[in-house]
Amino acid sequence: MEHKHDHKAMGHEDKKISHHEMMALDFKKRFIISMILTPPVVLLSPLVRTLLGLDFLSFPGDLFVLFGISTMVYIYGGYPFLKGLVKEVRKRNLGMMTLIGVAISIAYFYSAAVVFGLEGSMFFWELVTLIDIMLVGHWIEMRSVMGASRALEALVKLLPTTAHLLIDDDGTTKEVPTSELKKGDLVLIKPGERIPSDGVIVRGQTSMDESMITGESKPVEKGPGDIVIGGAINGDGSTVVKITKTGSETYLAQVIDLVKEAQESRSRTQDLANRAAFILTIIALVAGSLTLSIWLTVGQNLQFGIERAVTVMVITCPHALGLAVPLVVSVSTSISAQNGLLVRDRAAFERARNLQAIVFDKTGTLTEGKFSVVDVVTFGSLNETDVLSFAASIETNSEHPIAQGIVRGAKERNVKIKQVSKFKAIPGKGASGEVEGRRVLVVSPGYLKEHGMLPSSEKLDELSQKGHTVVYVLIDDKLVGALALADVIRSESKVAISRLKEMGIKCMMLTGDNRHVAQWVAEELDLDDYFAEVLPHEKSEKIKEIQARGLIVAMVGDGVNDAPALAQADIGIAIGAGTDVAIETADIILVKNDPNDAVAILGLSKATYTKMVQNLLWATGYNAAAIPLAAGVLYSFGILLSPAMGAVLMSLSTVIVAINARLLKFKE
């Protein structure tokens, strides 16, 4: 993916947001000035003066004053709509602005003709109140649009403007603009400060609040070697961070790019809304013309016919329809970004609501991707805790993955690790040492086999059949126990699989691991199916096989060796991306390594689609019901809508759609 953001680009984003603010302020200013000019227009209108008994306000040339003030409102207040009319006609894409522009122009030019001698009544007070209502409606709408974009704006503002750059080994710092930081720079992060850019801790222990960036609610403990994200808030400890990414490479810059890309990407639902809005505009223009013709045919005067036609065109404006989908897209994309769920492809995100099967990579996705002790078997008087304590004490001196797994298992169980002397590695077989004056060996089955000590045990056979790695513990050359190690299944995985199955989604697993290990994981998680001993390049073929069953399939993997499968799936979800969000083959990127986020993105997809449908049904249903009412079908019952009331109802529809979009919530 091409990233265009740097710190200057982020500044450009601020300008873009400011542009939206300027548009909102422009509508507000035009509304206020038009409102100031409205009372004299209303009071000078002959119909209003007669109804209110204000004939004493008449004076020579009052109609020309009325015309002049109304012209000011038409030109100044109506300018955005007239400009939009010209733009839509040029693009041959008629819409809301066409209807409003035509409606106010008909009212204005007909009324002007009456002032200059045409027989009939004037629409000046209806014209200015219509423009007032349209302006305030657009102002409220612009504020809603800005509100939906504020989460993205908040992301941009997470980075501090300055940083404490270390300039010598004595700890002397110099305050520099964040934009001037370079890769390799060392910066001091004091307690409570924000991280200025992505980097790695080189000194100090602390905790980081990354909730605004990844959605991780709890502070994350960090120490030397740990990656930190620009914008995160430092806890109580001072740390020194080496900058590894700047500008467009940083996590925040990439997220902002992805959010913008997702908001701008094509949406099938939006295409439907756009077509509906165009058709509705044509219907409104035709309905307005027919309304005028029918009323003139049945004997009503031109004024009445024009008023009905104008009301039809105003109330049928597809404004709410045009906003129905974009506002929901904007809100959902911002919500997902704030929770570490990054959407690259809107169409794939929308497809997720119809998902029928989800395929997980095993290592690092459903499992933690690292060994730990899953079972302890004893053969003598020592209990499980003692066996694990002696083994872990020996293995603290080894860098081997199995040794680290034993130590990890001991720490997870809060087992005491003791002092070791005379440590010695036994190449390919294990390690030995002295603990509390006793000779301890932690060795492989091969070592015991060589020495004729391999025990016979149903429990050990069962562990081996599950694909677990078994090592043995000897004390003073006597076998005291065995440890079974495996790639530990995440506790989150069980919850995620259970929730997915409740949603009626088939859960499967792909792994390059052996069949015994795959079967054990599948049984532990109650998966519907699994594929074992699959090489990376074969994974996409397995996805094709599942798709051949007629299922809509999502693939969840780490985005590296799973790339072909992510690309082949209907929805590719890269999990545990951390700060590396530039995973080309994924449609959706989950920052945290939590399978529950895959459930969350599906839930958000369904909630987003529901909001879109609600908005589309409201907008189209409202307009369909409003056309006959505006045309005057209830005139014989004394019910007649004025153009201004039509504008109120149309604006209300738009505001309801905007509010409904903002009510979209993320459920963890």
Image (tube, grey):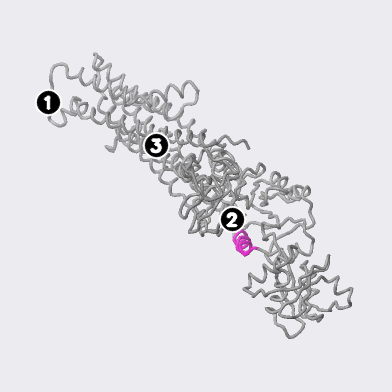
Magenta-highlighted residues: 490-501
Residue 294 image-quadrant placement: top left
- Kindly identify the amino acid type of the residue bearing the numbered disc 3: Met
Residue 298 x, y percent position in the rendering: 33, 25
Q: CA distance from mark 1 to mark 3?
A: 41 Å
Q: Nearer the viewer, mark 2 or mark 1?
A: 2
Visible in this render: residue 516?
yes
| 238 to the left or right of 26 | right
Instruction: Tell me if mark 3 has few (under 14), some (14-19) or many (20+) residues whose alpha carbon lies within 10 angstroms of its own.
Output: many
Q: Foreground: 216 or 291?
A: 216
State the separation of the CA atoms marked 2 and 1.
70 Å
Residue type marked 1? Asp
Q: Is residue 607 visible?
A: no
Element type at mark 3: helix
Against 567, is 76 above or below?
A: above
For disc 1, the marked residue is: 55
* Residue 350 image point, x, y percent: 57, 45
Q: How many marks?
A: 3
* C-beta proximity under 8 Å, tags 2 and 1: no
Residue at the spot of label 2: 599
CA distance separating discs 3 and 2: 33 Å
Q: Residue at x 27, y 37 (%)?
A: 638
